[in-house]
Image: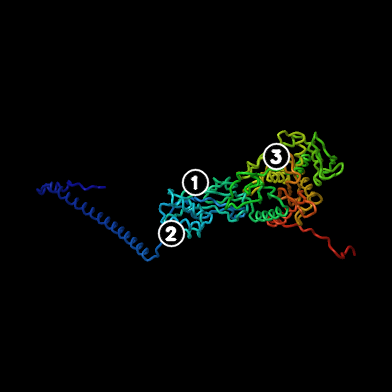
Amino acid sequence: MIRTPLRPLARVLEARDNGDDPALIEAENKRLRHEAMRDKARLRAEGRLLVLGAMFFCAFMTIGIRMGALASSEPEEPRAAVAGNPIIGQRSDIVDRNGRILATNLETHSLYAHPQDMVDPEFAAAELAHIFPELDEEKLLANFTGDRKFLWIRKQISPEQLQAVHDIGSPGLLFGPREMRLYPNGPIAAHILGGASYGREGVASAEVIGVAGVERFFDAYLRDPANEGAPLELSIDLTVQAASEQVLAGGMSIMNAKGATSVLMNIDTGEIISMVSLPDFDPNNRPPVLTTGDQSDSPLFNRAVQGVYELGSVFKIFTIAQAMDLNLVNPETLIDTTGPLTWGRFKIRDFRNYGPELTTTDIIVKSSNVGTARIANMIGADRQREFLNSLGFLEPTTVEMVEAPTGKPLLPRNWSEISTMTISYGHGLSSSPLHLAAGYASLLNGGTRVQPTLLRQDTVQTGDRVVREAVSTRSRDMLRQVVERGTASFGEVAGYKVGGKTGTADKPRERGGGYYDDKVIATFASVFPADDPQYVLIVTLDEPVESSGDEPRRTAGWTAVPVAAEMIRRVAPLLGMRPEVETLEPIGVTLTSN
């Protein structure tokens, strides 16, 4: 910037020539410069005031327009904007493999009392006893007129009951919010779900916790807010589960059994499609645990997981399959079946006299104890134990239930030669029906280990190999022949090639040792379709008696097999399996040559 000097030389010289005072030139120039600066500052201030005035005008116009819009609009409740997802506090739902609700939550209320606030305790006690018949009027009145300051009356009440209590009009009767666990299907899948109850409780809220089944096993997951309410998806199919329970209940009644269980499992994924234990219960009103007597008589007892039984001849296929895998026998190998087979003071007999020898296949078809025991002797105790361990028969199952560890197999203290022989045909080792289902699936799916699971799976399990694939194929063929011409002839289902093995085991006495003569565990372990297996079905009846004939019949072929056949007939279409229709030869005149 070029600045003008206050005392320019030319003007100073000119002033001196004219006799003027040069200092006046500097004073004049200062005055002019200050006036110019003042004018410039005034213009700048006027511009700023104009901009600020425009901004205030716009702000007031905006506020005025917004106030006019609010005044002319319908009134609404204010809503708070929240960043991110809300925290889900309630327990997650449980659904089946198709997303159908098995367990959910219902908002309800609790009822409690402050006796000191009651105006007419006698009237309140009488009315409450009328609304809730299970309450004792005299006991209520004693509590209302005593020294108690707080009293729970009901932990859960229905909306109708809430209104009825409200109509009493007593200021000492109060309501608290509650979230209850609801099982809309009642007793269907009761043992799988288990049930829920209240943990920590207060008048304003209560903690819902699982007490059994998957509700207890997945309790942390179901209560975790980080899941944002995502449901727990199980492997079971609600429709198949309901049909299985209906058929099994009918079979249990017809066969006069004291209990029954069934397990339907996918042979490749290990998914449990249905699992039934009878008698059952309603998890909405879970019964108390038995304090006396046999716990296995309680409806809470899960026979499929907790019940360990000697399952009988269904084990024979494991012995034959291991012998074939070790190249000790093939399906046509002749085995000595002369009986009885004596070992010390023990004698092993067959149900009938099958002659001096049978092929390996016919030992399965006719269910020869003697033949199976002799093959087990070829295998030996160590190899038998190792093979059964590879199938999971020596440890509890890993299914996702808190009851699973209690279903520990009962093994012989000394795995001797006689133990080897009796275990080969299902005596001397007790396991659960779920163990048996997993064992059959592992043997018949191509020979790879399968772990049972209650969670939906999208992929096939790839477990350790237990037998060669060729042995698995031969085993399936043998089981198919058991249905076609053996002890499970009642297991044939039109359109579905069923294979399976029967097992009838005498029940051991609770005291004194030995076995009952008239009490058995009847089991049918089946696979369908036998030529391309997809599912394994285990049906077990406790103390069945088929009494339509002149003499009572207790064997599995007469009791468990017909029930399993009816179950397959009912559930196979629900599983999307089309029956195979056999094509007939053409009938009538046909042209054979010109």
Marks 3/1: CA–CA distance: 43 Å
Q: What secondary structure is found at the residue carrying circle 2?
A: loop
Q: Which mark is residue 169?
A: 2
* CA neighbours of label 1 inside 10 A, class few (<14), some (14 to 19), many (20+): few
Q: Which mark is residue 200?
A: 1
> Residue 94 at what x, y percent from top left?
58, 51
Say which residue appears at 46% left-offset and 48% top-offset: 202
Specify the quadrant that holds the C terminus: bottom right
Amino acid at circle 3? Arg
Q: What secondary structure is found at the residue carrying circle 3?
A: loop
* CA neighbours of label 3 inside 10 A, class few (<14), some (14 to 19), many (20+): few
**Foreground tag (1 vs 2):** 2
User: Is residue 51 left or right of 27 when viewed as pictured?
Assistant: right
> Residue 373 at what x, y percent from top left?
79, 39
User: Is residue 558 left or right of 47 when viewed as pictured?
Assistant: right
Amino acid at circle 2? Gly
**Residue bearing mark 3:** 511
Determine whether 349 is above or below 487 in the image: above
Marks 1/2: CA–CA distance: 29 Å
Amino acid at circle 1? Arg
Q: Which mark is residue 527?
A: none
**Residue 536 visible, this orientation:** no
Identity of the residue furthest to the left in this view: 19
Q: Quadrant of residue 240?
A: bottom right
Q: Quadrant of residue 423?
A: top right
**Residue 121 visible, this orientation:** yes
